[in-house]
């Protein structure tokens, strides 16, 4: 068994051990779940240390045929696109469990669902076979349905049902696109992922466009992009805060990850759909930012800000050039850290006050200085302040978009809309900082406890990543540079 299989099946082994553990032994259940998520994170750290960032090809490949006639296989591998997502997935899962000590009902079932969710997420980023990818994609639906529906807020049943229906609806379009490609010659011995790339070149142009539209809908629901985002605000508001960390920090990136793979596979169709994708990206940035600005519920604000931030990812992908795709991949990592930190901090504040209405707070800096520091830094990063990882990602996306559209006289228009979305992001971030931390201290907020040591550790790791990668982005850029350059070469060969 290779290192990737060991990593993939570590959370599954934790699920198996938890099923054999008595439900009354809550401390042991928490210990086992945290142990296995920590092991998975350490395995990814070791993998990161031996990963060759200068090699654009897949590394640590594992291949075992499952259905030779179809060409499907148990095929695993990593490259510069999947490596940062693996780090993010295991890190945020560990942090989500650190933030789950307040869960007191059905503790065993909760931790089983978290580990099963991590298993599905790792499978999506490790799979190098479209059939295997689709299986792991669907696996993530099961634990999320129960995590939202069982441990969520008052409207949890509606939220979980909306999430499943939206995602399953999108998955149908994705499956249709996969089946459309599989009708072509796939019988050679490579994995289904590589053979589908080759088969896509033989498809008629109209069929390529229809197939890519299916992928855009399927992955766009999960990203989410406008107008496929309807499930997101309710799911975020009703989900437990640790689940919101995973939902926003990782699950949205699965959609962007799949869309990048699809665009590289069908670049000619992507070129034809480029105006639509650019419009959806820019509109999503403005739309999400405006709705975030209007929210009084802190979790709803962060949820709509995710729509805006993922619009930046879509815009970067739509540029079809190296700078834009680099910005999209950076934004995926940046948003994972920023959204994870925001949902963690909002959840910790809600546990102390039992309100998410921003109007109920005032001058928290006097009673919660450590919370104030972390929340302020994260909100400033969310608005793309220089010195944060969000700024580096947005800058690359803007450069990629401007270099593309300046040649056709649209560069100025792109900069205007992009700049407006950044200003809107600054407006809701500064508004939140002002309402939370300025003004007189309300009597109901005078006895609030500041961040405890485990909470300080969890928040500190995320905020440190936001600041360090903002000041020293080279390691994060180098991790994906070779793979992105190879992807850009494949796209250029087909569309130039």
Image (spheres, rainbow, N blue to C red):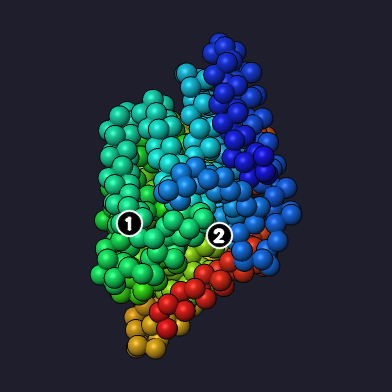
Q: Residue at x 52, y 70 (%)?
A: 487
Q: Name the residue under label 1.
A: 183
Q: Residue 302 at x, y = what percent? A: 42, 49
Q: Tell whether 213 sits left or right of 18.
A: left
Q: Residue at x 52, y 62 (%)?
A: 329
Disc tally is 2
Q: Which of 34 and 242 is in front in this view?
A: 34
Q: Nearer the viewer, mark 1 or mark 2?
A: 1
Residue 237 appears in the rendering: no
Q: Residue 179 at x, y = what percent? A: 32, 52
Q: Residue 412 at x, y = what percent? A: 37, 83
How far apart in space, not on screen, are marks 1 and 2 (Cα)?
28 Å
Which mark is on residue 31?
Answer: none
Q: Nearer the viewer, residue 383 or 427?
A: 383
Location of the C terminus by quadrant is bottom left
Q: Which residue is drawn at 39% across and 25% down?
A: 150
Q: Label 2 crowding class (10 Å Cα cut-off): few <14, some 14-19, many 20+?
A: many
Location of the N terminus by quadrant is top right
Q: Name the residue under label 2.
A: 81
Q: What element carries label 1?
A: loop
Q: Residue 30 at x, y = what percent? A: 60, 23
Q: In this view, does 146 lie above or below 56?
A: above
Residue 494 in which image quadrant: bottom left
Q: What element carries label 2?
A: loop
Q: Is residue 89 above or below residue 104?
A: below
């Amino acid at each position: 068994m290779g290192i990737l299989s060991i990593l993939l099946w570590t959370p599954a082994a934790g699920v198996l051990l938890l099923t054999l553990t008595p439900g009354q032994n809550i401390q042991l259940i928490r210990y086992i779940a945290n142990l296995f998520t920590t092991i998975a994170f350490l395995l990814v750290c070791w993998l990161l240390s031996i990963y060759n960032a200068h090699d654009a090809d897949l590394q640590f490949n594992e291949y075992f045929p499952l259905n030779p006639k179809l060409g499907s296989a148990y095929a695993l591998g990593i490259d510069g696109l999947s490596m940062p997502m693996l780090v993010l997935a295991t890190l945020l899962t560990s942090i989500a469990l650190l933030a789950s000590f307040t869960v007191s009902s059905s503790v065993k079932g909760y931790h089983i669902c978290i580990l099963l969710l991590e298993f599905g997420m790792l499978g999506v980023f490790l799979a190098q076979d479209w059939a295997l990818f689709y299986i792991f994609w669907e696996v993530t639906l099961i634990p999320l349905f129960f995590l939202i529906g069982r441990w969520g807020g008052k409207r949890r049943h509606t939220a979980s049902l909306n999430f499943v229906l939206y995602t399953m609806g999108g998955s149908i379009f994705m499956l249709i696109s996969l089946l459309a490609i599989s009708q072509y010659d796939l019988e050679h011995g490579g994995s289904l992922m590589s053979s589908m790339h080759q088969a896509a070149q033989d498809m008629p142009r109209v069929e390529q466009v229809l197939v890519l539209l299916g992928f855009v809908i399927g992955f766009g629901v999960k990203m989410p992009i406008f107008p496929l985002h309807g499930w997101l605000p309710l799911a975020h508001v009703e989900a437990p805060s640790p689940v919101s960390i995973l939902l926003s920090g990782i699950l949205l990136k699965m959609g962007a990850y799949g869309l990048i793979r699809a665009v590289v596979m069908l670049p000619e169709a992507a070129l034809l759909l480029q105006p639509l994708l650019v419009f959806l990206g820019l509109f999503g940035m403005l739309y999400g930012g405006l709705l975030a600005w209007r929210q009084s519920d802190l979790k709803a604000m962060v949820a709509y800000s995710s729509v805006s931030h993922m619009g930046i990812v879509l815009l970067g992908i739509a540029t079809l050039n190296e700078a834009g795709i680099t910005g999209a991949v950076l934004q995926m990592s940046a948003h994972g850290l920023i959204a994870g930190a925001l949902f963690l901090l909002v959840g910790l504040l809600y546990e102390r006050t039992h309100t998410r209405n921003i109007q109920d707070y005032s001058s928290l800096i006097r009673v919660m200085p450590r919370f104030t520091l972390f929340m302020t830094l994260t909100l400033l990063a969310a608005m793309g302040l220089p010195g944060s990882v969000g700024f580096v990602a947005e800058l690359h996306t803007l450069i990629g978009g401007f270099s593309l559209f300046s040649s056709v006289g649209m560069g100025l228009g792109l900069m205007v809309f992009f700049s407006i979305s950044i200003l809107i992001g600054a407006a809701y971030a500064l508004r939140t900082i002002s309402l939370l931390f300025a003004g007189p201290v309300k009597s109901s907020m005078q006895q609030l406890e500041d961040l405890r040591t485990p909470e300080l550790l969890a928040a500190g790791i995320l905020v440190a990543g936001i600041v360090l990668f903002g000041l020293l982005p080279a390691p994060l850029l180098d991790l994906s540079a070779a793979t992105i350059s190879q992807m850009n070469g494949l796209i250029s060969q087909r569309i130039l």
